[in-house]
Amino acid sequence: MHKEEIQVHPFPPIYDKDSRILILGTMPSVASRQNQFYYGHPQNRFWKVLSVVLGSRLPENIQEKKELLLNHGVALWDVLASCRIQMSKDSSIKDPVVNDFGSMLKNTRICAIYTNGRKADSLYQKLVYPYTGILSTVLPSTSPANAQYDLEKLIGEWMVIREYLHLF
């Protein structure tokens, strides 16, 4: 059994003044922390799904990933600033401390929040929504652990984010 460790969120949110939607995960995985950026596990389908939904080519490095987000009005962060967690298992999260969303929401055009998976959504609803007043829409997790959704089905579900992005 892996031991539980306190993790502090290792990198800043991605957003600018033109961001219109915010996508939230829970906490960066072990692979993401090692790769120094969001959704760094090679089997996580986040970047594949997002590039198709946004009609762009698949980004290959951190700079291209940031550009994909910012060029399409997408902000990216996680609900938690810190927590106790075993490896990358969201189900093991204890003692969650949330990020402060005040500055981001005040300095952007964010009008919709989407959560990547049920755990991110439940943490957001319980710990953040009372302060932001912005309802979230839960999307199926892009994690490889979410085997009930193949890539095509994930892309179909994630298309909803285009509603606020004025794409196509």
Image (cartoon, rainbow, N blue to C red):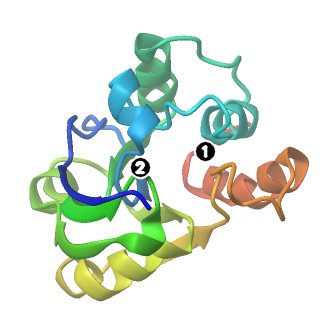
List x then y, in percent, for residue 107.
16, 48
Secondary structure beneath disc 2?
loop
- Between residue 106 and residue 121, name the one nearer to us: 121
Dividing the picture into quadrants, the one containing residue 117 is bottom right
Q: Is residue 50 left or right of residue 105?
A: right
List x then y, in percent, for residue 5.
22, 57
Q: Residues within 10 Å of mark 2 (few under 14, many from 20)?
A: many
User: Pointer 2: what residue?
Assistant: 20
Where is 84 relative to 151, above or below? below
* Quadrant assignment for the N terminus: bottom left
Point 71% across, 32% down: residue: 48
Q: Is residue 93 left or right of residue 32?
A: left
Tags 2 and 1 touching, CB below 8 Å: yes
Point 39% across, 72% down: residue: 92
Point 33% across, 48% down: residue: 77
State whether residue 15 appears in this view.
yes
Dividing the picture into quadrants, the one containing residue 116 is bottom right
User: Pointer 1: what residue?
Assistant: 166
**Mark 2 vs mark 1: in front:** 2
State whether residue 79 appears in this view.
no
* Quadrant assignment for the C terminus: top right
Secondary structure beneath disc 1?
loop
Q: Earlier in the sequence, mark 2 or mark 1?
A: 2
List x then y, in percent, for residue 159.
74, 53
